[in-house]
Amino acid sequence: MTDTAAPARNMAPITSERVALDLPILGDVPHALHGTLFRNGPNPQFPQAAQHWFTGDGMVHAFTLSDGRASYRNAWVRTAKWKAEHRAGRALVSGYTSQPSREGDFVDEGVANTNVIWHANRLLALEEGHLPIELDPASLETRGVQDFGGRLCGPFTAHPKADPITGELVFFGFSVDGELTPGMRFGTMDAGGRVTRFEHFDAPFCSMVHDFAVTRRHVAFPVLPLGGSAARQRRGGPPFAWDPALGSHLGLILREQGVASLRWFRMDPCYVFHVLNAWDDGGCVVIDVMQYDEPPLFPHVDGTMRLPAPEARLVRWTIDPDAGTDAIRQQPLDDTPGEFPRIDDRRSGLRHRFGAIAGRSRPGAGLDRLVWLDLAQGSRRCFDLPAGDGLSEPVFVPRDEAAAEGDGWLLATIWRAGEGRSDLAVFDTGDVAQGPVATIRLPHRVPAGFHGNWVQAAP
Ligand SMILES: [Fe+2]
């Protein structure tokens, strides 16, 4: 497989690290876009048969926009696993939905393949089972595990939330007492990277808690019945499986009081990979999520998979802490199936009006529709890609610091299925339906990945 071949659904890894300057552009890149979009995703150095999407080595792609021009760079995150496998010339770790196996003598730093964020002047590649891995923002060279002065240990979510008012980073970890254990941690660090809180608590059971919700006053942990079981794994079953009998639990704490204020709320079985945003509405907590009836990509406890794969839609949860622990109200907000929801991050933890989703033009399609939602008006604007093409997570960039919420651009990569390569597309939120105002053409593919963020350059 070469980097420009056209694999089904753009899942195969690419094999090279490149720098590309002055990329060809259709349309005009707004001059106000002065910075870099960093994206992360799985890109196994040594792909294995039937490898789970979640397990590939992280590869970071950086698109730098400046003065209307565009350049690109990509690099693997050189974890201890990546380096050991590179020396061995073959894969040393296998298994995820089956019994794992591991060869070689190296520290388990994970694969750093899920998100890449900028905090406290550091570029951090994240994967929820391990500590952040710091990268050089210019070269993408791997600097190594970042434990913030020895204050952090164990799993660190790939979806921490930055408070737009204080700059504080709010984070958590699951399975913190060892693989498939119910222990969790809640933590905060200030804008300078000083860890200010790092507390342990027990969830009702081990769940794959991929994301969480943070408001100005509250933090909510969705412990949903994608359950982890070491006993099941020892019997040869899947370590993580859909087990609705476990029920859905939402742990709610007050940010200022930490886990001492933890209360568990109950709701019907469902699954959520991603939270759009959350806020405090009077005494209630409102959380907008992409909700599945049951998770895709993971089996039932008997090992069977539900087909066709379940799909997520945007649903609003309203929790009234004074109304009892089984009074979570669920309200569908939009019927577009999709994933990778994002807001204008300046509204993180605050009531938001706008949201973007990588949607599907019809159930069962790939992510082929950019959806820009106006939740105040209950309206949406969409742009559909040509048949077969695929959209990444859309990342919002404001037109300038003072711009109103949602006034700016959405940046997303688009896989051009017929050409076996990718573009970076820039959409103006003023009229998403007209299509990209700028399309930056790469000569090669950017494989389907997970998450990224825009880092504005210094003026
Ligand atoms: Fe995610």
Image (cartoon, rainbow, N blue to C red):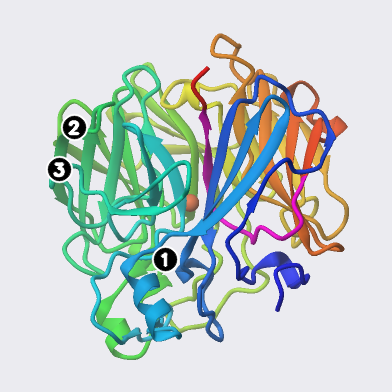
Tell me if label 2 and label 1 are in contact, CB under 8 Å.
no
The question of residue 425 being in magenta is answered with no
| Above or below 164: residue 419 | below
Quarter holding residue 348: top left
Tell me if label 2 and label 3 are in contact, CB under 8 Å.
yes
Amino acid under label 3?
Answer: Gly
Mark 2 or 3: the one toward you: 3
Amino acid under label 1?
Answer: Pro
**Residue under pointer 1:** 244
276 relative to 432 in the view: left or right: left
Residue 149: assigned label: 3
Amino acid under label 2?
Answer: Arg
Residue at (40, 51) in percent of width and height: 125
Q: CA distance from mark 2 to mark 1?
A: 39 Å
Tell me if label 1 and label 3 are in contact, CB under 8 Å.
no
Residue 333 in view of the camera:
no
Mark 1 or 3: the one toward you: 3
**Residue under pointer 2:** 194
- 146 or 459, nearer to the observer: 459
Lower sequence index among marks 2 and 1: 2
Residue 138 in view of the camera:
yes
Q: Residues within 10 Å of mark 3 (few under 14, many from 20)?
A: few
Q: Which residues are magenta?
A: 441-456
Question: Number of callouts in the render?
Answer: 3
Q: Position of residue 356 (x, y in %)?
A: 64, 35
Residue furthest to the bottom: 235
Q: Residues within 10 Å of mark 2 (few under 14, many from 20)?
A: some
- 50 or 276, nearer to the observer: 50
Mark 2 or 1: the one toward you: 2
Lower sequence index among marks 2 and 3: 3
